[in-house]
Image: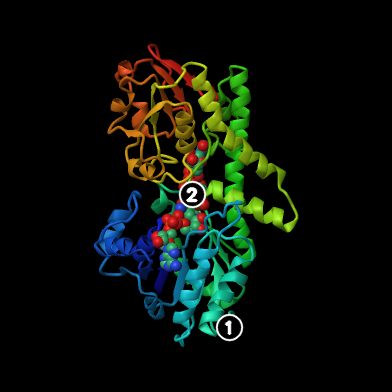
Amino acid sequence: MKLSIVGSGYVGTTIAGCFADLGHEVVNVDIDEEIVETINAGESPIHEPGLEELIATHAGETLSATTDYEAIHETDVTFLALPTPSNEDGSIDTGYIEAAAQSVGEVLAEKETPHLVVVKSTVIPGTTEELVANAIESTAGKRAGEDFHVAMNPEFLREGSAVTDFLEPHKIVLGTQDASARETLEAVYDPLREQAPGDPPVFATGIREAEMIKYANNAFLASKISLINDIGNICKEFDVDAYEVAEAIGLDDRISEQFLRSGVGWGGSCFPKDVDAIIAAATQAGYEPPMLEAAREVNDHQPTRMLELLDGHVDSTDKRVAVLGLAFKPGTDDTRNSRAIPIIQGLLDRDATVVAYDPVATANMQTHFPDIEYADSAARALEDASAALVVTDWDEFAALDTEFESMAEPVVIDGRRIIERREGIVYEGLTW
Ligand SMILES: NC(=O)c1ccc[n+]([C@@H]2O[C@H](COP(=O)([O-])OP(=O)(O)OC[C@H]3O[C@@H](n4cnc5c(N)ncnc54)[C@H](O)[C@@H]3O)[C@@H](O)[C@H]2O)c1
Ligand SMILES: O=c1ccn([C@@H]2O[C@H](COP(=O)(O)OP(=O)(O)O[C@H]3O[C@H](CO)[C@@H](O)[C@H](O)[C@H]3O)[C@@H](O)[C@H]2O)c(=O)[nH]1
């Protein structure tokens, strides 16, 4: 099939590369010329394992990119993979998706053949049927459900494993309001289902349900981490190892072993904004969700607890303090809502000299903190430091050993359980 994908960020580029690999003809539409040129040159605009290869293989053949919305005219289905960031009050900012939907409508005004517009972005229930459909109707001069169709197909991929997650999903949720839209979407996913291991289930549902499933998925996972962090904080008070506790409770299928790694908490472009957005939307609708508010509160407090552990060992005023890990998780250069941000800010508030290191995320963190020192290796960051705070669980940190010997004071505060306790360093785990 011929697919257009509007928005070529983490989600849009990943699904474009994958859909092209599955045999579809794909065009990415983005307003960012640099991204478009990068894709057309056969390169990936984001750091994501396996994506570079997919783009290199298909660019110039079944995959292309453009800033010109007219490209949508030649396609059957358009996915909207636009940002849905937070407003200042935490509520969803639908400005990008509305603007893109209007631009899609302008093209659909001149299109005679059937067209399906699929919202891939994470949006509050009602957004697809109301805001997106209305925006297209207003510029296309056509009727949703008659002249064109809308659908919602939430995405569950994780950064750092986006390609594998997309090609091997645990479920495919198709939110539609009519049979023709569902059949078209099923046809888009048929090649994926044929090759994916374990025949992933297709969950066909309504549009609003599909929108809510995405928030429920993320809210549940974020809350699970906050719950193990809450339990982990209790463990720390009683000198109990929260990781042993987690391993045991994870053996219960009803709990499951996943997302039980306690520490400095959840960051990234999704959990914080999506938890905020669903709390804001629910509150506006008349229900203040206490569990989700508590999950957020625990998460907001974990970096403070990490800094307090540091204070118990070192007065960091005018001392060099190493921050190991800047990405919000390993395997990505994304620093959006990384726990490293409140950690670095807390160190600066203490008048510490921050020396930060990350294998791939330095450039992105420089936009948040242009004036701190960035080291080109973990070893260099540790030199003469009076403490090290481990914020991201990159594998290479587990291999650090004699490097700690160059520290002025070998205090290591581990927020991710990645460093082994050993002689020669003063080691504090956040929840163990
Ligand atoms: N990042 C993830 O892991 C992930 C996973 C699942 C779902 N989501 C959701 O998917 C959506 C997209 O997230 P993302 O991380 O890919 O965003 P992103 O910020 O990485 O990419 C968005 C892209 O949209 C482009 N854009 C902005 N306005 C445009 C316009 N009017 N026309 C064309 N292009 C435009 C930007 O230039 C950018 O390249 C969000 O709703 C997010 O919550 C993200
Ligand atoms: O046991 C755990 C697991 C994760 N994290 C942290 O949680 C955050 C999010 O991690 P992860 O879920 O692996 O990454 P994301 O790429 O943000 O993916 C989440 O957000 C995406 C965007 O909505 C969804 O598509 C995915 O299903 C969902 O897992 C990171 O800061 C992790 O360090 C923990 O602290 N402990």
In the picture, the disc for residue 269 is 2
As drawn, which residue projects farthest toward the top?
423
In the picture, the disc for residue 143 is 1
Would residue 382 be seen by someone viewing this image from the given angle?
yes
Would residue 196 be seen by someone viewing this image from the given angle?
no
Q: Is residue 133 left or right of residue 358?
A: right
Q: Is residue 261 above or below residue 420?
A: below
Q: Given the image, on which type of amino acid does mark 1 rest?
A: Arg
The answer to which of 424 and 314 lies nearer the viewer is 314
Q: Dividing the picture into quarters, in which one does residue 188 lie? A: bottom left
- Residue at 48% x, 44% y is 337
Q: Earlier in the sequence, mark 2 or mark 1?
A: 1
- Residue at 32% x, 51% y is 50
Give residue 175's position: percent from left, percent from top.
58, 66
Give residue 198's position: percent from left, percent from top.
48, 53
Q: Disc 2, ligand 1: is the CB inside 8 Å?
A: yes
Give residue 383's position: percent from left, percent from top.
30, 22
